[in-house]
Image: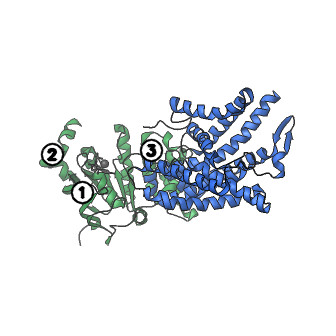
Amino acid sequence: MPESTALLEVRDVVAGYGRGPAILNGAGITVEEGRTHCIIGPNGAGKSTLLKVVSGLLPARAGEVVFDGESIAGLRPDEILRRGICFVPQERALFPDMSVRENLRMGGYIITDRADLDRRLDEVLEAFPVLRERGGQRAKSLSGGEQQMLTMGRTLVLRPRIVMLDEPSLGLAPRIVSQVFDIIRLLKDKGITVIIVEQNAVVGLSNADLGCVLDLGRTMFEGPADGILEDPRIRELYLGKRAGAA
Amino acid sequence: MTDILQILLIGAVLGGVYALMASGLTLIFGVMKIINLAHPVFIIIGAYISYWLFTLVGLDPILSMPIAMIALFCLGIVVYKLIFEREASSAKYSEMTVLLTFAVALSFDGLLGVLFGNIQRITSPSYAVEAVMLGDLFLPKGQFYAGLISIALIGALVAFLKFTRFGYAIRATTQNREAAQLLGVNVGLVSTITFGIGIGLAGASGALISFIFSFFPARHWEWIALLMSLIVLGGMGRLMGAVVGAFLLAIVSAFVGSYFGSTWSMMTFYLALFLILLVRPQGLFGEKME
Ligand SMILES: Nc1ncnc2c1ncn2[C@@H]1O[C@H](COP(=O)(O)OP(=O)(O)OP(=O)(O)O)[C@@H](O)[C@H]1O
Ligand SMILES: [Mg+2]
């Protein structure tokens, strides 16, 4: 028996928007239960597109997406959500004019049992006391860091197995970015498998167990995050400028 | 002083009626980003339903309001399914939907003209010619009833949006369609039902205005300008914005009408629309548009 088997296996995916060209052309990722994964790659590489394929927002033209031993390619977003895969898109995932509490309630939209939903909301508010304090406030009035906290807290309402976060640190001050990664560690401690896309490869990889390098719609490299950080070739191609700047 | 209170009172009552007329328009814009130029045509259809039910079988227009509402809800769903749904994935969605709503307005306007002629009509239950006295203030009973019922319906709509699961889905889709979909909201269904609700509200307001304003098929052109000014003032797609806009403009127009003559009271809305678009296109409560 291998130490940990793949929870989600994405292989050789080809996908594009509408009738447009293929944006992904041989993209894939092996996701292991309970680990944190970081996808890096240049702008336009197709990182967001890959997450959209997994979440069912964008159909794959070819390739496989296997979750827990079953193919989930072609399922609707809500069906994939019900299986426990939550996707938080890049920027503005909240409902700006809804209160913090209402946003959390929307996180459990697919749960129709009201009492059950209330229990789950309490659980999340327990984990994030700040959100309880701000309960009645509109989401748009929260600070950038609090908004990310709400976004991530909202995914917990479903007790998901995998949470995919597209650039959760985008536009946040460095101090807030480290808070975001604290929350990601908290997700991991709860046993949740995390996939993040991160512009700042060094920060992303050093907070992850496994890494995946995507370029031109293709997966170029996958492996332990520290291995990627130390690989001189990858450093030069994908981390060089940023590593120097950081 | 009594004069001013009197004008305020009439303005406020009409504001309630206008707010109900505009509520469906702003709801539909919020969820689907469709600027429904045909909205007032549906109001007029609602007015005809109540008019004929009163004239033919003597049913009070307030009692026939639910009938007009349900009939227009169904008509709204049919129109949405037949005409607008297929545009949902079109790249030229906004242009197409504006043109389509314009075509819908023309078609129903023509159809109503053929069916009922271009005759001014008004439903005339007994209270349409009576008045209530509130102390020194005087108010036509018809307007009083129409205003109160409009405000009650808007209250019910707000409660529906605020407290029901489907109301959450409508608000979420309005504010962030992709995020709503990712959380399991069936945004296609939400769009269809919201269109139905919006047109149903148009039907309800049609029943109420049938006994306070005279109407004829082409009158909707005048009303679309009025309604656009309310929802633009309040910030497109914001229900409470439209309600506040309706009260503000109705009161201002009541003052303008009483000091400069009633021809000018309609001008208030057109001028307001023009000024808002120049000075603050996002409206009082909207955020800046990119
Ligand atoms: N909705 C869309 N319709 C058409 N093309 C799109 C759409 N979204 C993305 N693309 C194109 O797909 C390509 C990959 O985009 P994607 O957003 O997946 O890249 P990314 O790796 O996430 O980049 P970034 O780091 O900038 O977020 C880009 O060339 C982009 O123009
Ligand atoms: Mg991206």
Would residue B52 be visible to someone looking at this image? yes
Q: Secondary structure at mark 3?
A: helix
Q: Chain of mark 1?
A: A
The residue under the point 44% across, 50% down is B96
What whole-number distance in Å separates the C-alpha atoms at marks 2 and 1? 23 Å
What whole-number distance in Å separates the C-alpha atoms at marks 3 and 1? 33 Å
Q: Chain of mark 2?
A: A
Return the x and y of residue A77 as percentages of the image width and height.
Answer: 40, 62
Would residue B31 be visible to someone looking at this image? no
Mark 2 vs mark 1: which is more N-terminal? 1
Q: Residues within 10 Å of mark 3 (few under 14, many from 20)?
A: many
Which colouring convention does the figure follow? by chain
- Write down which chain is painted blue: B
Q: Which mark is residue A22?
A: 1
Q: Residues within 10 Å of mark 2 (few under 14, many from 20)?
A: few
Residue type pointed to by label 2: Leu
Q: Secondary structure at mark 2?
A: helix
Whether marks 2 and 1 lie on the same chain: yes
The residue under the point 59% across, 40% down is B225
Return the x and y of residue A53 as percentages of the image width and height.
Answer: 32, 59
- Is the CB atom of the residue marked by disc 2 within 8 angstroms of ligand 1's nearest atom? no
Residue type pointed to by label 1: Ala
Q: Is residue A131 left or right of residue B208?
A: left
Q: Which mark is residue A237?
A: 2
What whole-number distance in Å separates the C-alpha atoms at marks 3 and 2? 33 Å
Whether marks 3 and 2 lie on the same chain: yes
Q: Nearer the observer, disc 3 or disc 1? A: 1
- Chain A's colour? green
Q: Which mark is residue B211?
A: none
Query: Dot 3 corresponds to which residue?
Result: A147
Return the x and y of residue B151 as percentages of the image width and height.
Answer: 70, 47
